[in-house]
Image (cartoon, rainbow, N blue to C red):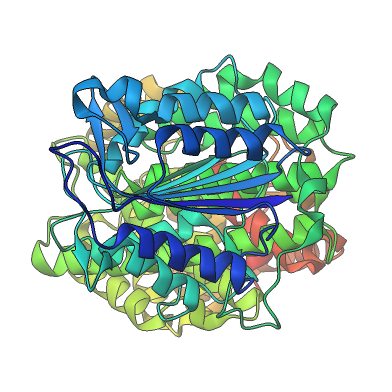
Amino acid sequence: MRILLAVGCDQYDYKPLSQLHGAESDAAAIFDHLVTKGWGEYDKARSRLLRSPSLAEIQNEVSAILFNDGRVVEFTFFFAGHGGVKDGAYFLCAKDSDVSKLSMTSLSMTQLFAWLNEAKVAQTNIIIDACQSGGVVHDISTLLNPNVIGKVGSLALSILAASGSDEYAGEIDGGGICTSALLSCLRGDIIVQTTRPTLDLVEVGKVVSETLGHGNQTPVYWGINLYGRARLAKNPKFAQGAPHIAEAWASFTPNEAANDHIRANADKIWGLYISLARGFDADRFFEVLEPLCDHFANEIAIASSFVEGLANTFGPRIRQNGDLYDEAQLYAACVASLMKLIESGNVADQVSQDLIRRTVRCVNEANEALLSQLRQDKYALLAPRSGFSDLYFLPLRVLSVFGWIGAAAQAATLLGQPTLLSRTAAADLVELILAEYSQSVVAVSDEQAPFYVAFVAGCDTLDCAEAAELTSGYLFSTLCDSRGQLAASRLTGDQALAFLDAKISGNYADIDDTLARPTSLLPALILHYHKMGMPDLVDRAIRTFDHVHMNIFTPFTYRSFCDPVVDGINYSYQVGHSIWRTADLVGEWRNIRSKIDDDPALKIASLRVGALLVSLLRPDREAWFNFN
């Protein structure tokens, strides 16, 4: 059951609360659109519109909705009027509220959250168009205590607040500025997205915040939902048919056994969420998520909904850090976690395709942002306190950007939506980095191999053959200079420093355990030189790599490619023994490639993209199926 309670309060009995002129009309407009006109498919008999009510009238209505006549599955609460923060808590002011007794005469958000928890509402949307409404975020600790994570309804909450905790909420043309922008999104005057039949409050809140963020008030949006994607309203701009709110949402809500399992992992989930303030850590994410997905292996709908809920919850949190490549990694990791469950057309496939689209969009935004930064400051790729360490880590950073560009280009093409990624911005960014950072396109670590493989394969899609050739040339030249010596993946800072010392002196004897033996970057470079029609350049230099061990690893199935340890075959070679020239490796590669193509998993687009993304998230493996 879906119910809306819309409250608008223009009239106030006690000063200094002034009379308002647009709160009631805002609530009426929201109610009219979502209930009367049916765009929210809320229950018309039980949904309510309150005009300038007393505190008791609000409390009685909330009580009747939440605790009478059956469980509420989805509840949307809209409030327009006065509000304020006192002693770290947020209060909504009713007609009879007295600011001198605010805690006794106003609706505390802490109390509302407690009611929602007790009523076990599966999904709640809260929209507040009032001054200092961003202060509502202070009260979410009531709902987000680790002890209650996993209870039905306790982690399915989305909030849109009209202003920050120290800002006023303005009015225009007889209505709230925030509500006006919200209605523009709900009516389709402002496009939120066109790919899903429903709109959720977090994605709407993001657009509202971006629309109004340059004025005197900045709307705050927030959401946490472990049970799928919330549905605020039908999407008037849905491009694939009539917008609708599916009846099957409840089936995506975990059953009691599934809910108990989520509850048992509450501390890990909450700890992961908190850690996002320091950036996205793919290893930690997989450590928490993989056991949960494995537990739900026979309940694909629940697992898919859970992963989608994490994406919807964690994405906005990461975006606040300002690193869009991190947000792309989150969505990519969510795709990776579903790989074992994907079958063509099933719910895991559908959720994964949506997450892939989000990954590509984030990479696109990140490309455009980084391009703008580099045009203003050519040193923007350097670490904030860069120094000697960037001699090692900057080449990794450059290849990482290239790898995500290449992966995004391939992902968009495989989904049949190549325009998701701006080829112009991607090509311009690569060209600018190669111009300004050519001395940092250096082969230092085998960790660069998966990013290089993804990039050169993506260059076919981006028509960037020259960029692929330049990048290959810089890497191959510097690899020749070090006689094939590369660092292993995932070195610590101290290990990286020791490697740089050895690289400068040419004496690697004391750091043997930190070297890549065998290497995957060298065979990738050799094979790409063959593809470029330049095998003679490699053949003339191949003596430089005498005795260097190379390896090409392929899994038995790419479904398991995200596992910490993957079962498969290592095809190992040594220069000067089994490999004497480019043609020798190419001959071996053709046999390997034919076996890769036999994996049915790679016939499913979302699974193929997932495997590609895994190689960037866990850069100790390469997506060799990219090499044609």
Q: Is residue 547 visible?
A: no
Residue 532: x percent and y percent?
50, 80
* x, y percent for residue 86: 23, 24
Relative side of 383 to 595, left or right: left
* The furthest residue to the left: 377
Query: Seen in the image, is 580 located left or right of residue 491?
Result: right
The quarter of the picture where the C terminus appears is: bottom right
- Which residue reaches farthest right? 298
Answer whether residue 19 is visible to the viewer in this image.
yes
The quadrant holding residue 82 is top left
User: Residue at left 23%, top 55%?
Assistant: 20
Q: Residue furthest front?
A: 13
- Which residue is more in the foreground, 447 or 18? 18
Q: How many marks?
A: 0
The vertical placement of 460 against 205, above or below, is below
User: 303 or 328: nearer the eye?
Assistant: 303
Q: Position of residue 168 (x, y in %)?
A: 17, 49
Q: Residue at x 46, y 32 (%)?
A: 56
Q: Is residue 261 left or right of residue 57?
A: right
Residue at (29, 58) in percent of width and height: 441
**Residue 518: % across, % down:** 57, 40
Q: Relative to the observer, which residue lies in front, 360 or 541?
A: 360
